[in-house]
């Protein structure tokens, strides 16, 4: 939309983004945009002002004249900016807006779903728990053994003697250095694990969420994102080093090889951290019914200067996801065949197809009932249901049951 303002001596063209409805205030002669019906994250254009009418005119004439001076027309020469980001980006679901308001625009996020068996999640989580408890025990033991020495050393400062030797000074220096390293290197581990000072902690997350069949996982980019989220450069633009680095890191993090057979906790690495506080918030949204688990399938979330928060998902068109699903089914069939249970594979497929074809679609409630019936079917064939899915890396990528 373009506006033309009639003024003395000609017409002043005003170019405006047609995402906005521009309104004229008769009292101030100021064009201002109405933001009630637009994307919540647009770049806000400057106010457009007109020179006031001559001082000799009355207020009533001023208002009437102002309304007659301005006229809105449609221009065919002005090309509006699209409100839809370029592929493979898209606008996120409105149900994710409460979560997005909690995230930092300085980082890139990858939500996903962890459908690993509960027993497997418990084992994985016990490893860092025991490790950090061992670190705490070591620090407590060190304090218990060295504290009397430091107390006696402090009391000896008042009576300095000349009996200090080089070997004694060296021993004290090494003792101080060891304790400093224990404090500086080891203490942050249990502190972040149990309490958390940045984005929550694993213990607080597990305490709030518990162990579930399906859990929301949210990864947050580490320091490499400074090369992508560069001031003045929009990550959605197809060209440039920032976009290439973004695509490289996100593809690597969301690939089948990176996510198969891994619980959310194992997804921690040098490129991605876990946002524990956001994971608790997302799980609470699901519990309250404000969002569904499907809203947290694997994708990337990044803030664009032009479009606000956008969602990156190269598999949204279906091609990549279909190929991954085909490989998952083949692997699933091969494992059952190697166990001499190929018939169980076809019974499973028949069950899933029957339930998903019912009116209303394959809802989450229907999936859970299907899982219960499948578990009974597997156990009748002498196959431990949970151990089997553990052996094939969970249900990620399984068409109809893929919760990523």
Image: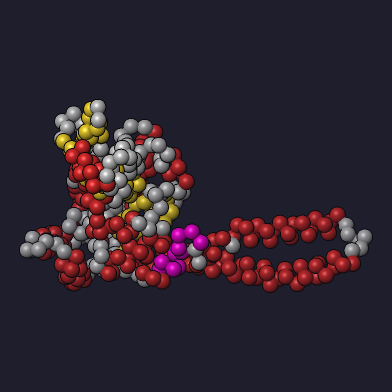
Q: Position of residue 218 (x, y in %)?
A: 36, 57
> Can you name the residue that lies furthest to the front here?
56
Q: Position of residue 114 (x, y in %)?
A: 31, 60
Q: Nearer the viewer, residue 135 or 183?
A: 183
**Applied colour scheme:** secondary structure
Q: Nearer the viewer, residue 181 or 121?
A: 181
Residue 202 image-quadrant placement: bottom left
Q: Residue at x 78, y 59 (%)?
A: 172
Left or right of 346, for residue 398: right
Residue 109 in the image: above or below residue 372: above
Q: Residue at x 28, y 66 (%)?
A: 286
In reply to whether residue 30 is colored magenta, the answer given is: no
Q: Nearer the viewer, residue 226 or 378?
A: 226
Whether residue 109 is visible to the viewer of this picture, yes or no, is yes
Q: Position of residue 77 (x, y in %)?
A: 18, 29
Q: Residue at x 36, y 36 (%)?
A: 244
Q: Residue at x 45, y 63 (%)?
A: 200
In reply to whether residue 202 is colored magenta, the answer given is: yes
> Can you name the residue that lies furthest to the top here?
9
Provide the residue span drawn in magenta.
197-206
Residue 244 in the image: above or below residue 103: above
Q: Position of residue 312 (x, y in %)?
A: 29, 46
Rendered-image quadrant of the C terminus: bottom left
Rendered-image quadrant of the N terminus: top left
Left or right of 151, for residue 12: left
Q: Nearer the viewer, residue 97 or 54?
A: 54
């Amino acid at each position: 939309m373009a506006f033309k303002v009639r003024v003395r001596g000609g017409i002043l063209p005003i170019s405006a983004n047609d995402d906005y409805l521009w309104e004229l205030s008769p009292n101030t002669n100021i064009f201002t945009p109405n933001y009630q019906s637009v994307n919540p994250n647009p770049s806000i254009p400057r106010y457009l002002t007109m020179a006031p009418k001559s001082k000799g005119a009355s207020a009533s004439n001023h208002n009437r004249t102002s309304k007659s001076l301005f006229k809105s027309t449609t221009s065919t020469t002005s090309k509006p900016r699209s409100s839809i980001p370029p592929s493979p980006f898209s606008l996120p679901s409105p149900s994710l807006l409460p979560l997005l308001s909690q995230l930092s625009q300085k980082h890139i996020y990858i939500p996903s779903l962890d459908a690993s068996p509960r027993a497997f999640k418990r084992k994985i989580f016990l490893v860092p728990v025991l490790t950090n408890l061992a670190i705490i025990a070591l620090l407590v033991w060190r304090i218990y053994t060295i504290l009397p020495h430091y107390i006696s050393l402090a009391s000896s400062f008042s009576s300095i003697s000349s009996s200090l030797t080089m070997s004694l000074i060296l021993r004290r220096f090494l003792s101080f250095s060891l304790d400093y390293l224990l404090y500086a290197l080891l203490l942050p581990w249990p502190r972040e694990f149990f309490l958390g000072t940045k984005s929550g902690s694993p213990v607080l997350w597990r305490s709030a969420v518990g162990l579930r069949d399906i859990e929301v996982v949210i990864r947050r980019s580490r320091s490499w994102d400074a090369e992508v989220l560069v001031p003045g450069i929009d990550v959605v633009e197809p060209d440039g080093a920032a976009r290439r680095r973004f695509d490289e890191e996100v593809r690597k993090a969301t690939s089948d090889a990176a996510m198969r057979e891994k619980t959310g906790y194992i997804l921690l690495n040098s490129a991605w951290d876990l946002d524990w506080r956001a994971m608790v918030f997302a799980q609470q949204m699901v519990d309250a019914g404000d969002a569904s688990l499907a809203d947290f399938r694997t994708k990337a979330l990044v803030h664009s200067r032009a479009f606000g928060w956008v969602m990156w998902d190269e598999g949204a068109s279906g091609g990549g996801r279909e190929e991954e699903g085909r490989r998952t089914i083949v692997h699933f069939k091969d494992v059952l065949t190697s166990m001499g249970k190929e018939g169980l594979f076809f019974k499973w497929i028949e069950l899933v197809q029957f339930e998903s074809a019912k009116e209303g679609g394959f809802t989450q409630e229907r999936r859970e009932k299907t899982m219960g019936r499948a578990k009974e079917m597997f156990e009748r064939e002498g196959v431990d249901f949970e151990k089997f899915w553990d052996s094939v890396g969970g249900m990620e990528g399984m068409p109809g049951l893929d919760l990523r």
